[in-house]
């Protein structure tokens, strides 16, 4: 397994297991299968509503001695309803209890979007809090305090644009270690890649396979698929690997962490093998032409009627980077 070094000196495994949409009853088996296969990195979040089951799997596998806690990298996230500074540590402690851990390796602000306390998914105006009223920097300071207490080893963000990252970097005492964003050949985000390289921020690529199991309501009509793309199919055939492995190897070859989700034992192993693959220069050049600025997870679900958030405000009009 390759690792990437973070600003703290910690090393994050280049490939991890995603757990969004991994159903109760399936996620524990997937986590155990993955760790037995050799995964050392699991990406979690309370909004995936499966952290207690992930925690049960982690406890069971740690008990067998297959792996030690220090060998595992566990990421989780702060949901939108706990941005108020006094709610950050309790939310983190709930996640730690659910995952049955004393400390997280990485704790991320899940979205630059705030909901009223207790609201799982905002539907009307009063359930949203505009960022002007709940500034990210105040939430960030609470994450910094959690790190100072030793509850998390690294802190970072998700779904931040370059402008939001710049603003945070200017105000933060502890710089964000990671930005976890959607990244794949249709959304290559080269300006973001350069900014993060310059500022020692590690990028993690979510939905690296195109998130085909998203609920139908989150899909656009006639949206493109990555796994069926003929160029990717040709590169895969030339290298004697699968299209999924090609996509994951592309991400790691660019220096980004990838966190494919699977609950299928064969695909869990297939994806892990991609961490050892190298694509040739011709393949990396062929990928360039596939960039079309397409987001599978565009956050439109935060921008409905009555919301202070819009697609323009979420992405700062950077969706075609
Ligand atoms: N921070 C954020 O806001 C955010 C947003 C989205 C995602 N994430 C994280 O990123 C992870 C990955 O993203 P994602 O879940 O959206 O999508 P993804 O990993 O791009 O795609 C998952 C889909 O690909 C299938 N799949 C997995 N391996 C495959 C293979 N080798 N061949 C063919 N199909 C394969 C899975 O099916 P099977 O399970 O049946 O194999 C599932 O349908 C999430 O689970 C979550 O942890 C974070």
Image (cartoon, rainbow, N blue to C red):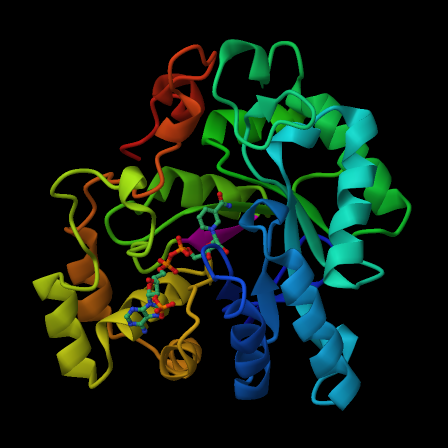
Q: In the figure, 82 relative to 177: above or below?
A: above
- Would residue 43 appear left or right of 307 to someone viewing this image? right
Percent across and percent down for residue 73 are 66, 67
Q: Position of residue 137 (x, y in %)?
A: 70, 23
Q: Viewer-proximal residue, 279 or 297?
A: 297
Closest to the observer: 321 or 63?
63
Residue positioned 11% across, 64% down in the render? 231
Q: Which of the 4 image quarters holds residue 128?
A: top right
Q: Is residue 177 above or below residue 102?
A: above
- At a point 46% along the width and 31% down the height, the residue shown is 161
Region in magenta: 202-206
Q: Residue at x 78, y 55 (%)?
A: 96
Q: Is residue 62 above or below residue 13?
A: below
- Image point (77%, 74%), residue name: 70
> In the shown orientation, is residue 46 left or right of residue 172?
left
Quarter occupied by residue 317: top left
Residue that sits furthest to the front in the current view: 25
The answer to whether residue 51 shows anywhere in this view is: yes
In the image, farthest residue toward the right: 149
x and y percentages locating residue 30 in the rendered image: 51, 75
**Is residue 104 visible to us here?**
no
* Residue 215 falls inside the magenta stretch: no
């Amino acid at each position: 397994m390759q690792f990437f070094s973070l600003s703290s000196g910690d090393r994050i495994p280049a490939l991890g297991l995603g757990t969004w949409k991994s159903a109760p009853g399936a996620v524990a088996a997937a986590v155990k299968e993955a760790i037995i296969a050799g995964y050392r990195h699991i990406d979690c979040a309370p909004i995936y509503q499966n952290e207690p089951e992930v925690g049960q799997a982690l406890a069971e596998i740690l008990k067998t001695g297959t792996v030690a806690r220090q060998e595992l990298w566990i990421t989780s996230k702060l949901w939108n309803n706990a941005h108020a500074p006094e709610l950050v540590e309790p939310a983190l402690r709930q996640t730690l209890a659910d995952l049955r851990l004393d400390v997280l390796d990485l704790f991320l602000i899940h979205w630059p979007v705030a909901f009223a306390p207790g609201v799982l998914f905002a539907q009307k105006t009063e359930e949203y809090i505009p960022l002007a009223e709940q500034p990210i920097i105040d939430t960030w300071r609470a994450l910094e305090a959690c790190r100072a207490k030793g509850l998390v080893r690294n802190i970072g963000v998700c779904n931040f644009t370059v402008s939001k990252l710049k603003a945070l970097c200017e105000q933060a005492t502890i710089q964000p270690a990671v930005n976890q964003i959607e990244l794949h050949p249709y959304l290559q985000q080269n300006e973001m890649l350069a900014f993060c390289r310059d500022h020692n921020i590690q990028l993690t690529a979510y939905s690296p396979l195109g998130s085909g199991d998203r609920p139908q309501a989150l899909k656009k009509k006639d949206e493109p698929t990555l796994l069926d793309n003929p160029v990717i199919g040709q590169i895969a055939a030339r290298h004697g690997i699968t299209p999924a492995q090609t996509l994951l190897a592309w991400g790691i070859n660019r220096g980004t962490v990838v966190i494919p989700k699977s609950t299928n034992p064969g695909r869990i192993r297939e994806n892990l093998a991609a961490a050892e693959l190298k694509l040739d220069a011709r393949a990396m050049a062929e990928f360039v032409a596939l960039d079309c600025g397409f987001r599978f997870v565009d956050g439109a679900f935060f921008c409905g009627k009555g919301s202070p958030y819009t697609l323009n405000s979420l992405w700062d009009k950077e969706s075609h980077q």
